[in-house]
Image (tube, rainbow, N blue to C red):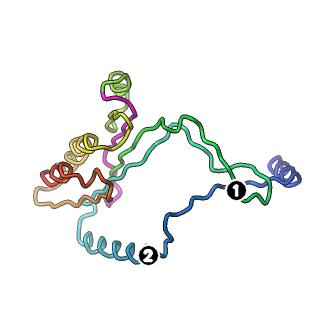
Amino acid sequence: AIEQIVRRFLHHIGLTHRVSMHTAQRNPVETEAASTEFMEFMRRKVNNMNPDHVVNIDQTPLPFTFHSNRTWTKRGSRTIHIVGSTSDTKRATLAATCTMSGKMLPPLLIFKESQNGRIAQKELLKFPEMGFYATQKKAWMDESMMLLWIEKCLLPWKNTLPDDTTPLLILDSFRVHMMGPIVEKIQGI
């Protein structure tokens, strides 16, 4: 009942609930053929593979503050402005890895700080042992963090597989994934 009262009141004074929209860089129709071709290629590639032998990694930023994409504005407004906080640069990066069967490998969580700072020296030691933690000056997945992920996450997973297994690692075209030392290290394990 209270929710209905608030809705009627807001409607009466001319406000409506709006959601900010994101604009795609390209129309999905433009990428449909390439996406379909890629999906068919991947289906053929993994067709007879054990789902536990196919692994994928991706990174995502984890901001410490989450801004709502909803606001109240006058009905009929064409442009909606939402202001974020000044702490947008405070974040961490999560490197999540899972097998095609859905099993999760230990995550790598990267915090924004120098490698010998307070977080690395005091805080990370208190974190749960269910994942791996590191610091990087911008909390990015750079070459050193990727090498750490290979050592701490990928290599232990690979060592659990039978010796005659050829696993498949699926990576996106993120620049650090294609660096020579990274490719060599992955091929060497």
Q: Which type of secondary structure does the marked residue at label 1 adopt?
A: loop
- Residue 65 x %, y %: 55, 38
Q: Amino acid at mark 2?
A: Glu
- Residue 75 x %, y %: 80, 57
Magenta stretch? 99-115
Q: Which type of secondary structure does the marked residue at label 2 adopt?
A: helix
Horizontal side of residue 27 vs 57, given as left or right: right
Horizontal side of residue 62 vs 107, given as left or right: right
At a point 42% along the width and 38% down the height, the residue shown is 92
Q: On the image, numbered disc 1 is attached to which residue?
A: 79
In this view of the protein, which residue sits in the foreground, 12 or 74? 74
Q: On the image, numbered disc 2 is attached to which residue?
A: 32
Location of residue 49 with respect to 181 vertically, above or below? below
- Residue 181 x %, y %: 18, 48
Q: Few, some or many C-alpha atoms within 10 Å of disc 1 (few <14, some 14-19, many ≥20)?
A: few
Marks 2 and 1, the one that precedes in the sequence: 2
Q: Amino acid at mark 1?
A: Thr
